[in-house]
């Protein structure tokens, strides 16, 4: 029993019936929902994805992940890896919200994260291609829904030769069925593909930094 006449209640779930997160106000007259978030936006699913990512059993061993949170040291390669995710090429459309969030989980940093908050593709259109160049992504990932992604066409765009991702041949495709459909595939195949791309970038950069350090020592 509570000594308070009113209180706030926060409920966080994977999916539930449809709501994944809800905030309620409780008072003498009962409960009133004041805010909710629906699937596929889910803290619980993200938590399960992280559990699976480190080799534990999703929907079963999340408690182990919780216990591990107190251990280890934060590490990064200078900063998060800058990633431009292109959902469509003409016009350029950037990543939808769940893709942007999965990028963060994989260790990347969506260069147009502010646009990802818009659910409609028309609200994520990048009118000026040079604004993408200006953000200097380390990695470019294309997933042209219903159309084959062409890295060579991306590299040939005017001004894009100056982008680190193009210079270093870090332009990749992820199948639309694996990443652009909300649901289990995005949290498994999609996240795995993103993580592989980002981790390979980290290894490549780490090797380059090591080689540069050896050259300086020899000099």
Image (cartoon, helix red, strand yellow):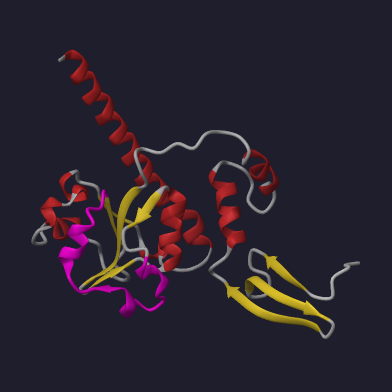
> Most extreme residue toward the right, as rendered?
1
**Looking at the picture, does residue 217 appear above or below residue 149?**
above
- Please tell me which residue lies in front, 179 or 158: 158
Is residue 144 part of the magenta span, yes or no? no
Residue at 40% x, 75% y is 118
Horizontal arrangement in the rendering, residue 199 relative to residue 28 (left or right): left
Using the rendered view, name the quadrant where residue 37 is placed: bottom right
Instruction: Return the x and y of residue 159 as percentages of the image width and height.
Output: 9, 58
Residue at 31% x, 58% y is 111
Using the rendered view, name the quadrant where residue 198 is placed: top left
Segment colored magenta: 114-138
Using the rendered view, name the quadrant where residue 41 is placed: bottom right
Residue 48 in sight: yes
- Please tell me which residue lies in front, 53 or 126: 126
Instruction: Return the x and y of residue 11 as percentages of the image width and height.
Output: 70, 67
- Say which quadrant the N terminus sits in: bottom right
**Looking at the picture, does residue 15 appear above or below residue 191?**
below
Instruction: Return the x and y of residue 97 as percentages of the image width and height.
Output: 43, 67
Instruction: Return the x and y of residue 200 as percentages of the image width and height.
Output: 34, 40
């Amino acid at each position: 029993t509570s000594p308070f006449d009113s209180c706030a209640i926060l409920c966080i779930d994977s999916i539930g019936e449809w709501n994944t997160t809800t905030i309620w106000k409780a008072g003498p007259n009962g409960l009133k929902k004041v805010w909710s978030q629906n699937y596929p936006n889910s803290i619980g699913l993200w938590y399960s994805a992280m559990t699976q990512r480190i080799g534990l059993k999703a929907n079963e061993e999340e408690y182990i992940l919780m216990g591990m949170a107190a251990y280890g040291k934060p590490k990064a390669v200078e900063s998060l890896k800058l990633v431009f995710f292109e959902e469509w090429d003409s016009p350029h459309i950037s990543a939808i919200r769940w893709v942007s969030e999965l990028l963060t989980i994989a260790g990347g940093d969506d260069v147009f994260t502010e646009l990802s908050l818009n659910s409609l593709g028309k609200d994520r259109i990048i009118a000026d291609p040079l604004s993408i160049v200006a953000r200097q992504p380390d990695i470019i990932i294309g997933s042209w829904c219903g159309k084959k992604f062409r890295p060579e066409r991306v590299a040939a765009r005017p001004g894009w030769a100056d982008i680190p991702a193009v210079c270093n041949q870090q332009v990749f495709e992820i199948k639309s069925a694996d990443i652009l459909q909300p649901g289990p595939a995005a949290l498994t195949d999609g996240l795995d593909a993103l993580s592989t791309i980002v981790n390979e970038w980290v290894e490549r950069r780490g090797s380059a930094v090591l080689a540069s350090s050896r050259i300086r020592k020899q000099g």
